[in-house]
Image: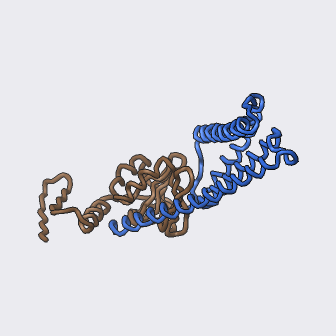
Chain colours: A blue, B brown
């Protein structure tokens, strides 16, 4: 009784582009903010190409990862968050935003914000999943009792 | 409670009327029983045709223009298209949960939400089904009654 899992190519391509654009937007907004507030400059036009390449590669990983249905939603959220955090740090390192000798503070501040974000996102996910699952299973139980 | 059964020989189709003050759980159960009792699904297995009991069917799946009914141990080929089954089983415990699958809600052990609005359903035989985002809303609405 195995289920055949086929995702239509159209849906796959749409998901890929949505994901690429989302990651691209996240990276752009983060580094535009850093450039504006730290370096008072947002002229990083050529870097957008690097953002686009990183976004498209990262989307491939995420698209594959999201097809794994056996992982719980909380683990999925954590992995996606850590993956995006790593992408941000790697991008920042490649573009010399994070200088581990002269600009350690910015790097540490980013790490701290990412950790705080992770804690918040995990708490929200756990709570949301618990509430949502409890209510769904309650409705399922009621349905079965009604139908019996 | 009064029960009245009239035998009308020239009737084309059996009609059942229920008059009640309020539709409660008992009325729901009776109406569901009547609905499912009048639905017969024939399934083919090894060249033999069997009448399948709806309550025994876990789900229907369309594979390459053929539709199969999955019961606990066997898989029967049925002569309906998935769209036809969706209509026939509209007011029963069956609901379409993916482009190719119609699932019996009574065979679900537990459900849990996934990312992207999908729902994972574990059946009583421990098989896992994914209710895709497109059908998740209708699934929740059906559960809510």
* Rendered location of residue A62, percent (x, y): 67, 48
In terms of image quadrants, where is residue B41?
A: bottom left
**Which residue: 55% across, 50% down?**
B116
* Rendered location of residue B108, percent (x, y): 46, 65
* Rendered location of residue B72, percent (x, y): 49, 68
Please state which of residues A126 and B72 is positioned toward the viewer in this rendering: A126
A146 sits to left or right of A1: left
Q: Residue furthest bottom?
A: B1
Please state which of residues A37 and B54 is positioned toward the viewer in this rendering: A37
Q: Residue furthest right?
A: A101
**Which residue: 37% across, 67% down?**
A142
Please state which of residues A136 and B135 is positioned toward the viewer in this rendering: A136
Q: Is residue A141 visible?
A: yes
B118 sits to left or right of B9: right
**Which residue: 33% across, 67% down?**
A146
B115 sits to left or right of A52: left
B126 sits to left or right of B49: right
**Which residue: 77% across, 29% down?**
A46
Which of the image's four quarters has the N terminus of chain A? Answer: bottom right
* Rendered location of residue B14, percent (x, y): 20, 57
Residue A57's place in the image compared with A116, above or below, is above
Which of the image's four quarters has the C terminus of chain A? Answer: bottom left
In terms of image quadrants, where is residue A51?
A: top right
Please state which of residues B71 and A30 is positioned toward the viewer in this rendering: A30
Residue B62's place in the image compared with A23, above or below, is below
């Amino acid at each position: 009784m195995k289920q055949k899992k086929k995702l239509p190519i159209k849906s796959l391509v749409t998901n890929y582009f949505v994901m690429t654009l989302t990651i691209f937007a996240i990276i752009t907004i983060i580094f535009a903010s850093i450039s504006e507030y730290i370096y008072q400059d947002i002229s990083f036009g050529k870097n957008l190409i690097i953002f686009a390449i990183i976004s498209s590669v990262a989307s491939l990983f995420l698209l594959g990862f999201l097809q794994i249905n056996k992982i719980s939603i909380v683990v999925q959220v954590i992995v996606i968050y850590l993956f995006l955090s790593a992408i941000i740090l790697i991008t920042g390192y490649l573009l010399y935003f994070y200088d581990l000798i002269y600009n350690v503070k910015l790097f540490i501040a980013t790490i701290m914000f990412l950790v705080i974000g992770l804690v918040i996102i995990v708490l929200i996910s756990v709570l949301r999943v618990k509430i949502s699952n409890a209510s769904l299973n309650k409705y399922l139980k009621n349905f079965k009792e009604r139908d019996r | 409670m009064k029960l009245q059964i009239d035998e009308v020989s020239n009737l084309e189709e059996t009609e059942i009327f229920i008059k009640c003050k309020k539709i409660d759980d008992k009325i729901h159960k009776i109406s569901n029983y009547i609905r499912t009792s009048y639905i017969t699904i024939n399934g083919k297995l090894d060249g033999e045709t069997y009448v399948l009991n709806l309550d025994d069917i876990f789900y229907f799946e369309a594979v390459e223009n053929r539709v199969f009914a999955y019961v606990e141990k066997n898989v029967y080929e049925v002569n309906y298209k998935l769209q036809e089954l969706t209509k026939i089983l509209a007011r029963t415990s069956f609901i379409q949960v993916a482009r190719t699958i119609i699932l019996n809600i009574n065979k679900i052990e537990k459900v849990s939400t996934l990312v992207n609005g999908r729902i994972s359903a574990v059946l009583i035989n421990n098989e896992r089904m994914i209710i895709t985002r497109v059908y998740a809303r209708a699934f929740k609405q059906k559960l809510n009654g």
